[in-house]
Amino acid sequence: MNEPTASIIAAVIAGFVGILVGLIAAGIQYRTKSDELFYKALDFLDGGTQRRNLGIAAIELSWNHRRFRPIATALLIGSALYLLLESEQKFAS
């Protein structure tokens, strides 16, 4: 193999490796940001009605991520039970 051909092959391989590394880094960054947003949404569940509604809406956005469902389900059930038990409405349930 002559030198120009070897240089072209090396450049193509380096390009593919660069693209692969970039895609992996983007995937990791996306997952990290997704986790941050989900856990930030949990902070909204402890406030009043409007804050709680924001938290629930943010959790619904993360519902398609399987790894969040068990946490979200438990938190939403806990919030509903709290509201039903602590509500001063006799017939809330």
Image: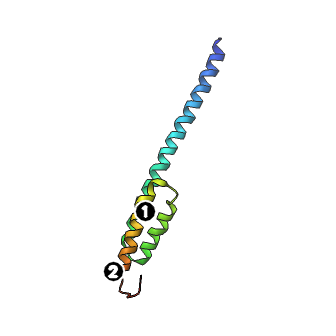
Disc 2 crowd, CA 10 A, few/some/many (<14, 14-19, 20+): few
Query: At which x and y percent is residue 25?
Result: 49, 41
Question: Dividing the picture into quarters, in which one does residue 77 lie?
Answer: bottom left
| Residue behind mark 2 | 86
Q: Residue at x 37, y 69 (%)?
A: 78
Coordinates of residue 68 in the picture (x, y in percent):
44, 57
Is residue 73 depicted above or below 18 in this figure?
below
Which residue does the image show at 54% across and 40% down from the upper left?
23
Give amino acid for label 1. Answer: Ala
24 and 89: which one is in front? 89
Quadrant, the N terminus: top right
Residue 91 visible (yes or no)? yes
80 over 43 or under it: above or below: below
Q: Is residue 9 above or below residue 88?
A: above
Query: Is the residue under label 1 in contact with that under label 2 (CB below 8 Å)?
Result: no
Disc 1: which residue? 72
The numbered mark, 2 or 1, whose residue comes first in the sequence reads 1
| Secondary structure under the numbered disc 1 in the rendered image | helix
Residue 41 in sight here: no
Quarter in which the C terminus is drawn: bottom left
Count of picture labels: 2
Farthest-out residue, top: 1
Distance, label 2 to label 1, CA atoms, is: 21 Å
Along the viewing direction, whichever of 64 and 54 lies nearer the viewer: 64
Please provide percent x and percent y for residue 53: 46, 73
Q: Position of residue 61 (x, y in %)?
A: 51, 62
> Which residue is at a point 44% across and 68% down the rendered structure image?
55
Q: Residue at x 35, y 86 (%)?
A: 88
